[in-house]
Amino acid sequence: MAEETVGTPGVTPAKATRHRQEKVGVVTSAKMTKTITVEVRRRVPHPVYKRIITKRSKFMAHDEHGKAREGDMVRIVESRPLSKNKRWSLKEVIRSSSAGV
């Protein structure tokens, strides 16, 4: 038996798009070259007392063209490890801060 092919011969299947995690946050630092620090806040109920509390996480993201400024609201996406702490990339600047103008 020869190799069995699935689908139409000569036609390559559509490239599978990966689902990458996205987060929205505010840029807290843009002082590094091609790197920004993004603070993501989320509101969750306390496990015991059920009161709503705000938790925050900081992520370092790759900003290839230096578009993001401090105070901007940005969307970051998961990517391959780019350095020791950098595993996210800038997707878009959602809202620009007025401080940079």
Image (spheres, rainbow, N blue to C red):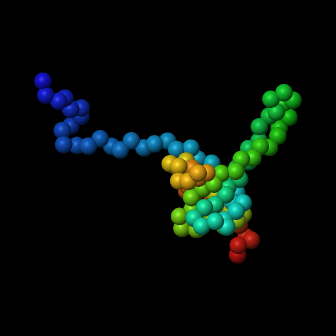
Instruction: Tell how many labels.
Output: 0
Q: Is residue 50 left or right of residue 23?
A: right
Instruction: Indicate the position of residue 99 as horizontal and vertical percent values.
Output: 74, 71
Q: Nearer the viewer, residue 45 or 64?
A: 64
Which residue is depicted at the point 70% across and 73% down?
100
Q: Is residue 52 visible?
A: yes
Given the current orientation, which residue lies at the most extreme top position? 1
State whether residue 65 is above or below residue 76. below
Q: Quadrant of the N terminus?
A: top left
Q: Nearer the viewer, residue 33 or 6?
A: 33
In which quadrant of the rendered view does residue 60 lie?
bottom right
Query: Residue at (77%, 37%) from the top-left corner?
Result: 44
90 shown above or below 67:
above
As drawn, the residue found furthest toward the front would be 84
At which x and y percent is residue 43?
77, 41
Q: Is residue 15 left or right of residue 83?
A: left
Q: Is residue 51 above or below residue 91?
A: above
The answer to whether residue 75 of the structure is visible from this angle is: no
Q: Quadrant of the C terminus?
A: bottom right
The x, y position of residue 49, in whole percent, is 87, 29
Residue at (60, 56) in percent of width and height: 61
**Looking at this rendering, what residue extends furthest in the left direction?**
1
For the point 17% across and 30% down, which residue is it? 3
